[in-house]
Image: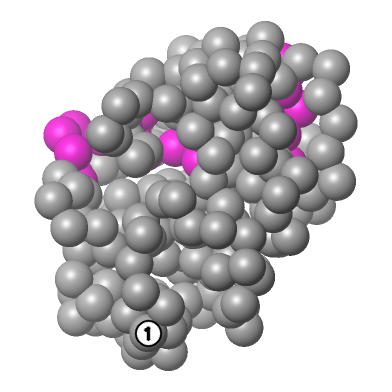
Amino acid sequence: MIPFKICGITNIKDALAAIEHKASAIGFIFVKDSPREISFETATEISKKIGNKISKIGVFVNQEKKIIEKAIKSIPLNMIQLHGDENPLFCSSFSIPVIKAIQIKNDESINKVREYNVDAILFDTYKKNVRGGTGSSFDWNILSNQKYDKPIILSGGLNKKNVLEAINSINPNAIDVNSGVEVRPGIKSHLKVKKFYNTINQTKNTGFQFE
């Protein structure tokens, strides 16, 4: 099965549901004013309860390095996902693997990929003043016939109805789901998580690891 991350985890029950349905990773969003924001304290509590059963990814937007480093050590995190305007030098300055999110608006958006020396690139939907969790997919044709020298994670409005088409169209190394398995922002539907897992269960394992 293709590796997948369930992002926007805010409570232990949803984290356990992700583990039960074979998710490769969960995402904690440490972004002020996000409807899926989680505190370092709550993320640490969840992390202690689940141990090493699943990889834990911290999502940040234009935050200071010392804040990110604190989260890496205290929670702890396996990877970080930088979803803002972080420059290539900043993204390359951490001791653990880094995912850089690129919002896809048009063909020119793809050019940013070459600027970053990171462990993976996440493609997400562009929406003005919104960083992820839009619930909308972008035009996958923009990514067609593209070649990358880094693993690609596909995000943006994925759900059980469109995820197989997305995988077949883009052939990503991993996928990231958030709003597509929610009851409301920050609260996952365990039934939707189960159906999402059942939909992708027969896909091929790409070998990518969230760690």
Q: Is residue 170 magenta?
A: yes
The picture quadrant where one finds residue 202 is top right
The vertical placement of 143 against 31, above or below, is: above
Residue name at image x 60 percent, y 28 percent = 109
Residue name at image x 46 percent, y 18 percent = 137
The vertical placement of 70 against 62, above or below, is: below
Q: Position of residue 35 (x, y in %)?
A: 15, 45
* Residue nearer the viewer, 112 or 150: 112
* Residue nearer the viewer, 42 or 203: 42
Residue name at image x 18 percent, y 33 percent = 183
* Residue carrying label 1: 66
The picture quadrant where one finds residue 187 is top left
Amino acid type of disc 1?
Lys
- Location of the N terminus (image quadrant): top right
Q: Position of residue 179 (x, y in %)?
A: 31, 32
User: Total marks drawn?
Assistant: 1
Residue name at image x 65 percent, y 39 percent = 112
- Location of the C terminus (image quadrant): bottom right
The vertical placement of 12 against 116, above or below, is: below
Magenta stretch?
Answer: 168-187
Label 1: how many Cα within 10 Å (few below 14, some 14–19, many 20+): few
* Residue nearer the viewer, 142 or 116: 116
Compared across the picture, whether 183 is left or right of 178 comes to: left
